[in-house]
Amino acid sequence: MKRSLMVAAALASFAVPAAAPLTVLAQDAEAGGGRRGAALQNGGEERRQRQAEDRPARAERPRQPRAETPPPPRPERPAERREDRQERREDRRENRQERREERREERRADRPELRQDRREDRQERREDRRADRPDLRQDRREDRRDNRQERREDRREWRQDRREDRREWRQDRREQRQERREDRREYREFRNRFNADHWRRDWNRRHARDWWRHDRRWRGFSGVRIGFYFAPGYGYYSVPRSYWNQRWHVGQYLPSIFWRYQLNDWRTYGLGYPPPGARWVLVDNHIYLIDEFDGYVIDVVYDAWAW
């Protein structure tokens, strides 16, 4: 409907401007030739009368009756259409019912044959299973034997591996104990040639109390901060709450978060040469000598400088 209205509007928009000149010409012809038209009309009537008098009279033709055409069929009423639909539904229902009954009859007729076929199939399967039972039992026996043999071999290998692992573990423990004994011997030798109390006495004798204030390594120090330590040459670093303001003694293990703040210029501080595998570490205003492998504290200098 919308499309037809749009098409009619478009045609009207093109036809009206095109018909306007023709309308103007027709109005001019009526206004200019009014008198001429009246004269022509009178002369035309006289001419028609003369021609009618001169013509012979025509014989009237008999009128033939027209064939009556049947009226177009009336459109069906809604009630009739409903009845037709209802009839078609009933016919479909009847056809469905007939097809169902036919299928049921076919299945009933085929049931005896199907039952017989199933019985025969079951009988054949039973016979096949009976015939295959000896083979299956033999296969299972062989499989069980193989599994037992494999489990025995696996247990032997596992026991052998455990024995070898225990031997290696014992050997490793012996080697570690030997290494620790050697390390402890070296640590004792170091403590014999280095004494923290003597170092502090000599250091305080040669340096003032605030010697560190003019040292370039303390250039970024601005005072004590809670939750932070200051390491000369490294700056401030965060410390976990459980390690804040805590001291570690000889024989304990220093946490690994402090291992990276190593004191490389130990000669400047007059400290002893660290044994192989050991290093000096700065923690707050303390200096620890630790083992590089596990952080074992070999020696310690508390309060190396005062803030």
Image: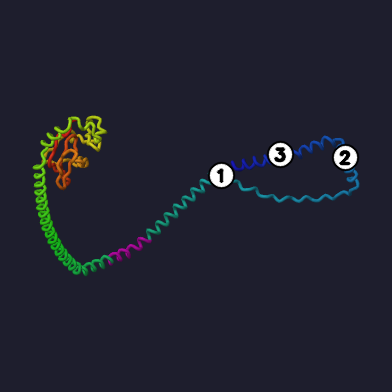
The C terminus lies in which quarter of the figure?
Answer: top left
Q: Are marks 1 and 2 in contact (CB under 8 Å)?
A: no
Instruction: Name the spot of residue 155 as percent of width and height, x first.
Output: 13, 60
**Mark 2: which amino acid?**
Leu
Identify the element where label 3 is drawn.
helix
The one of 92 and 255 positioned closer to us in this rendering: 255
Residue matched to label 1: 77
The one of 149 and 246 positioned closer to us in this rendering: 246
Tell me if I can see residue 236 in this picture.
no
Give me the C-alpha separation between circle 1 and circle 3: 47 Å
The one of 173 and 104 positioned closer to us in this rendering: 173
Instruction: Name the spot of residue 70 as percent of width and height, x first.
Output: 66, 49
Q: Is residue 30 left or right of residue 224?
A: right
The magenta region covers 106-120
Looking at the image, residue 152 lies above or below residue 239: below
The N terminus lies in which quarter of the figure?
Answer: top right
> Viewer-nearest of labels 1 and 2?
2
Identify the element where label 1 is drawn.
loop
> Viewer-nearest of labels 3 and 2?
3
The one of 62 and 270 positioned closer to us in this rendering: 270
**Mark 1: which amino acid?**
Arg
> Viewer-nearest of labels 1 and 3?
3
Give me the C-alpha separation between circle 1 and circle 2: 60 Å
**Mark 3: which amino acid?**
Pro
Residue matched to label 3: 17
Q: Are marks 3 and 2 in contact (CB under 8 Å)?
A: no
Residue matched to label 2: 40
The residue under the point 76% across, 38% down is 23
Would residue 125 be counted in the magenta stretch?
no
Looking at the image, residue 90 lies above or below residue 224: below
The residue under the point 50% across, 48% down is 85
